[in-house]
Image (cartoon, rainbow, N blue to C red):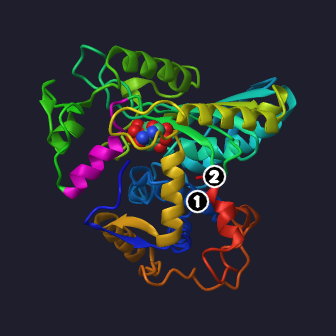
Amino acid sequence: MPTESASSSRCGVVWARELVRDLAVAAKVPPGDAGRFADALVAADVAGIPTHGISRLNIYLRRIQAGLINPRARLAVRRRRGGVLVLDANNGLGQVQTLKALDKLVPLAREHGVAVATIRNSQHFGAVSYYCNRAAAQGMILIASTNGEPAVSPEGACQAFFGTNPLAASFPTGLGWPVKIDFATSIVARGNIIAAQKRGQRIPPGWALNLEGEPTTDAAAALAGTVLALGGHKGYALALMLEVLSGVLSGAAIGPAVGSMYKNMNRAQGVGHFLCLLDIAAFMDVSEFKQRVDQTIQGIKACRKRPGVSEILVPGERSHRRAQENHELGIPLEESTRAELKQLCKDLGVKFRLNPVDDLRPPAPRRRSLPRAAAHTFRGASSQSSRRGPTHQAHRWPQ
Ligand SMILES: NC(=O)c1ccc[n+]([C@@H]2O[C@H](COP(=O)([O-])OP(=O)(O)OC[C@H]3O[C@@H](n4cnc5c(N)ncnc54)[C@H](O)[C@@H]3O)[C@@H](O)[C@H]2O)c1
């Protein structure tokens, strides 16, 4: 998991949300949607996934400016049967449309025990666990995936076909944080290679092939070539399964037909998502489920440790610790991302306001009231006098 690097400095969580939201509003995203979008992006940074957080704001907003993302798109229901929804994002922001899809799925899952949505005509939607954690906070299990721009080659090929097709699911526990399983089916998420390129660093051997299909440690050559699938043929098979669910079944673009967020500034991405929501209460009491997950975690942690290992961690535990640290100290922001934010502010006429590390007070209260959706997302953000109040606790769980 990426940590703070020499080229990063910290900024307050509430300030970061405000700035991202203001920039999105300036880019014509409706205020309520902008609030949800900002929450999704900043949550990734808080959880220690900076590759899928604020560092992507620039490209999302540039694509809006280029007319490739519709900031006001409606989420359309194309088909519905029982707990199945076939949705069309109409080229809206992936984060916003996925959150709206989840809003539709929750009552369906409560009714049927399970509800499934596919979404077509969408975009890169960031860290998948953000949506899964939100479901876990409501006593539900969301199993989610997405396809993406071609980056990963099938076993034996040296041509990118699959996206890094991540798979995620989160499970509520009695511990105050969810078990969070969230990984790309490539050996690393492509964001790590983009981050290395931005920092001018080489990537470790074994991550990628260049255009000729030879192993490379050059980040630019890796981005031009292909990332390797996780675990060889097994990762390839998993990527194919997720491509079928997210791309084929949804009616979205498939494999190389998915547009590149960075390279194709002349066409929409056409990404597809797959969301399967289980209502735990249909299977057993949520409290019993949590107890059983906690028992499982205890069992895992009680395993005999390998030599040199001081602690066995459970997926989600590091993110939880990172979130606590980042709420406390502020989120690390790469210099390159800070520079992008400054440029965006200049271009969109927004005041650049990111507090220094030693001033973690949230921005001053605004006079206008937030629209309902934003008020929900930013619960208490404008009325807090301290970052450590209960409203911040309310933010922690979805990360
Ligand atoms: N939207 C997209 O198209 C897209 C594509 C690829 C990846 N992503 C996102 O990129 C992010 C990073 O993906 P990644 O593949 O680099 O994940 P990763 O390698 O950082 O982590 C993978 C999983 O391992 C767990 N984990 C890590 N270290 C652990 C430890 N020591 N003990 C126990 N569990 C541990 C994490 O909780 C996580 O569930 C994810 O949030 C993913 O959703 C998004």
**Callout 1: 10 Å neighbours few (<14), some, many (20+)?**
many
Asked if the residue under mark 1 is in contact with the one under mark 2, i.e. CB atoms within 8 Å, the reply is: yes
Is disc 1 placed on a helix, strand or loop?
helix
**Residue at point 35% right, 56% down?**
3
**Residue at point 67% right, 51% down?**
176
Q: Which residues are magenta?
A: 186-199
By secondary structure, the bulk of the magenta-drawn segment is best described as helix
Q: Is mark 1 within 8 Å of ligand 1?
A: no
Q: Is residue 5 left or right of residue 303?
A: left
Can residue 34 be seen in the rendering of this structure? yes
The amino acid type found where label 2 is placed reads Pro
Instruction: Determine the image quadrant of residue 268.
Output: top left
Task: Quickly name the residue at label 2.
Answer: 398
Instruction: Determine the image quadrant of residue 11.
Output: bottom left
Picture mark count:
2
The amino acid type found where label 1 is placed reads Asp
Q: Nearer the viewer, mark 2 or mark 1?
A: 2
Q: Position of residue 75 (x, y in %)?
A: 67, 43
Image quarter for ligand 1 equals top left
Question: Is residue 198 in the magenta section?
Answer: yes
Q: Is residue 1 left or right of residue 96?
A: left
Q: Is residue 163 left or right of residue 182?
A: left
